[in-house]
Image (cartoon, helix red, strand yellow):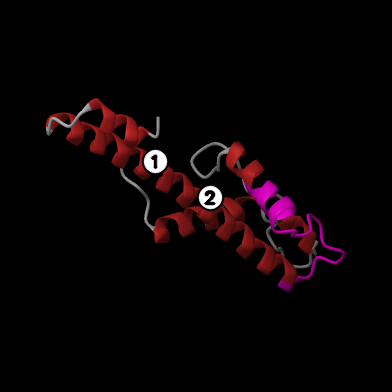
């Protein structure tokens, strides 16, 4: 399986967040708070719902970022979008790291079996 580059991930997140943002129209004002809606889920541009829930948990509970601002200014919305995108990137990278560590441990076990090491060393690798 191929992994996405940082540029591809950033582009995907920009599209996902842009798909739910209000579109400014001449002579039709919109509220900046409309940009605080979560990005689209599912489909080609969508993000996994579980990932969005994890993002909300990290932002609110771990990092103490307010869920709703008192006043949704353009600057706040820009910063909030940036923090949400960075958080999603961080969570995605953490998942990839866990997968790679699992693959590495599997390959180490195979190598240990091929090289004829004792079962005791396998158990040590697994932490049993």
Pointer 1 with pointer 2, Cβ within 8 A? no
Vertical placement of 24 versus 104: above or below?
below
Q: Quadrant of the N terminus?
A: top left
Vertical placement of 30 versus 48: above or below?
below
Residue 17: assigned label: none
Residue 85 visible in rendering: yes
Please tell me which residue is depicted at 74% across the width and 53% down the height of the picture. 60
Q: Which sits in the foreground, 80 or 27?
A: 80
**What is the x, y in percent for residue 108?**
24, 38
Q: Which sits in the foreground, 92 or 31?
A: 92
Residue at the right extreme of this rendering? 70
Q: Which sits in the foreground, 114 or 63?
A: 114
Please tell me which residue is depicted at 19% across the width and 34% down the height of the picture. 112
Query: Residue under circle 2?
Result: 91
Q: Residues within 10 Å of mark 1 (few under 14, many from 20)?
A: few
Q: Which residues are magenta?
A: 55-75
Residue 99: assigned label: 1
Tell me which label, 1 or 2, sits earlier in the chain: 2
């Amino acid at each position: 399986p191929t992994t996405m580059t940082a540029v591809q991930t950033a582009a995907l997140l920009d599209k996902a967040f842009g798909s739910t943002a209000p579109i400014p129209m001449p002579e039709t004002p919109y509220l900046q708070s409309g940009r605080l809606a979560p990005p689209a889920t599912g489909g080609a541009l969508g993000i996994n719902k579980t990932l969005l829930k994890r993002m909300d948990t990290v932002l609110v509970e771990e990092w103490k970022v307010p869920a709703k601002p008192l006043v949704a200014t353009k600057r706040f919305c820009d910063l909030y979008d940036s923090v949400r995108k960075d958080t999603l990137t961080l969570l995605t990278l953490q998942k990839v790291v866990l997968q790679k560590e699992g693959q590495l441990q599997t390959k180490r076990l195979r190598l240990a079996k091929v090289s004829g090491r004792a079962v005791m060393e396998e158990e040590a690798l697994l932490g049993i």
